[in-house]
Image (cartoon, rainbow, N blue to C red):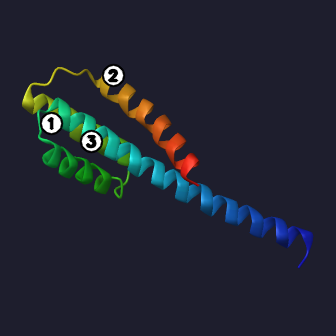
């Protein structure tokens, strides 16, 4: 193998690891935001956990962040929970940062 081949394999390996960590962080973020939203919706812990799991499953769809946001915003509107779109997005962003930190520490 040439040096170029070694670099290419190294880059591909690094990209795969980075993609896996990003996926794990998004899943963890969706779990966290789901538990937060479940609490705001007045769900008991078991229902909030089930709700959070539904949000994790939404991450498999295209534009996952928008799908998760829209689901929470719609559920809040139906339940009369007073949270602005900005507050929901801000919480998603803060939980993404925390989830990335947790995933990095677990490696």
Q: Residue furthest left?
A: 79
The residue under the point 22% across, 32% down is: 73
N-term-proximal mark, 3 vs 2? 3
* Residue 41, position as x, y percentages in the image: 14, 33
Q: Residue 17 appears in which quarter of the rendering?
A: bottom right
Query: If the image is split into quadrants, where does the C terminus sit?
Result: bottom right
* Residue 11, position as x, y percentages in the image: 74, 61
**Residue under label 2:** 86
| Residue 97 seen by the camera | yes
The residue under the point 22% across, 41% down is: 71
Q: Residue 81 appears in which quarter of the rendering?
A: top left
N-term-proximal mark, 2 vs 1? 1
- Could you say whether the residue bearing mark 2 is in a helix, strand or loop? helix
**Residue under label 3:** 34
Q: In the displayed structure, would residue 89 be above or below residue 67?
A: above
Asked if marks 3 and 1 touch (Cβ < 8 Å), the reply is: no
* Residue 60, position as x, y percentages in the image: 35, 58
Q: Which mark is residue 75?
A: 1
Asked if marks 2 and 1 touch (Cβ < 8 Å), the reply is: no
The residue under the point 13% across, 47% down is: 47
- Could you say whether the residue bearing mark 1 is in a helix, strand or loop? helix
CA gap between label 3 and label 2 equals 16 Å
Q: Residues within 10 Å of mark 3 (few under 14, many from 20)?
A: many
Which label sits in the foreground, 3 or 1? 3
The residue under the point 11% across, 33% down is: 42
CA gap between label 3 and label 1 equals 11 Å
Q: Is residue 105 left or right of residue 89?
A: right
* Residue 96, position as x, y percentages in the image: 45, 38
């Amino acid at each position: 193998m040439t040096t170029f081949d070694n670099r290419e394999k190294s880059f591909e390996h690094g990209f795969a690891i980075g993609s896996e960590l990003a996926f794990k962080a998004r899943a963890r973020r969706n779990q966290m935001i789901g538990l937060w939203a479940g609490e705001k919706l007045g769900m008991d812990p078991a229902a909030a956990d089930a709700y959070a799991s539904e949000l994790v499953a939404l991450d498999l769809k295209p534009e996952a962040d928008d799908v998760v946001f829209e689901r929470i915003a719609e559920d809040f509107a139906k339940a009369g929970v007073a949270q602005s779109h900005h507050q929901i997005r801000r919480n998603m962003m803060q939980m993404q940062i925390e989830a990335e930190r947790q995933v990095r520490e677990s490696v």
